[in-house]
Image (spheres, rainbow, N blue to C red):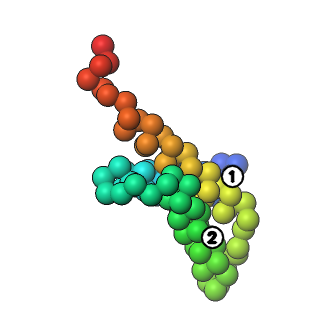
Amino acid sequence: MFDWVPAADKLAHLVVYGILGALLARGRRLQGHLPHAVLIMVGALYGASDEWHQSFVYGRQVSLLDWVADLCGVAVGYWLTYSLARVDVRTWG
């Protein structure tokens, strides 16, 4: 669909896994106190399991670069959500 956009599939991986990272950060803030690295590794392992699953789907292939995009997305989404959640918007303006 977006074949004309260079690396569109990597961008899609980055965005979708960024959402996962944001949800992991939000869950940590609401429920638990697991170390940040553990939660980012959960997202990375989910991405790895998704790539492994694709090896069983006809027409799909496993890609290390897709997994790297997943990992980057999880890390960026996690960091942005965690950082922004710590900002007190009442002090703005």
The image position of residue 76, as x and y in percent, is 55, 45
> Which mark is first along the chain, 1 or 2?
1
**Label annotation for residue 72:** none
- Furthest residue toward top: 93
Residue at horizontal 56 percent and vertical 50 percent from the top: 75
Per the image, the residue denoted by label 1 is 7
Res 2 seen here: no
Res 57 → quadrant: bottom right
The image position of residue 80, as x and y in percent, is 48, 40
The image position of residue 11, as x and y in percent, is 60, 51
Residue at horizontal 68 percent and vertical 58 percent from the top: 68
40 vs 45: above or below: above
Q: Which part of the image, by quadrant, shows the N terminus?
A: bottom right
Q: Check disc 2 and give the amino acid type.
A: Ala
62 vs 42: above or below: below
Q: Which part of the image, by quadrant, shows the C terminus?
A: top left
User: Is 89 on the left-hand or right-hand side of 37?
Assistant: left
53 vs 21: above or below: below
- Furthest residue toward right: 64
Q: Check disc 1 and give the amino acid type.
A: Ala
Per the image, the residue denoted by label 2 is 48
Res 82 → quadrant: top left
Residue at horizontal 65 percent and vertical 48 percent from the top: 5
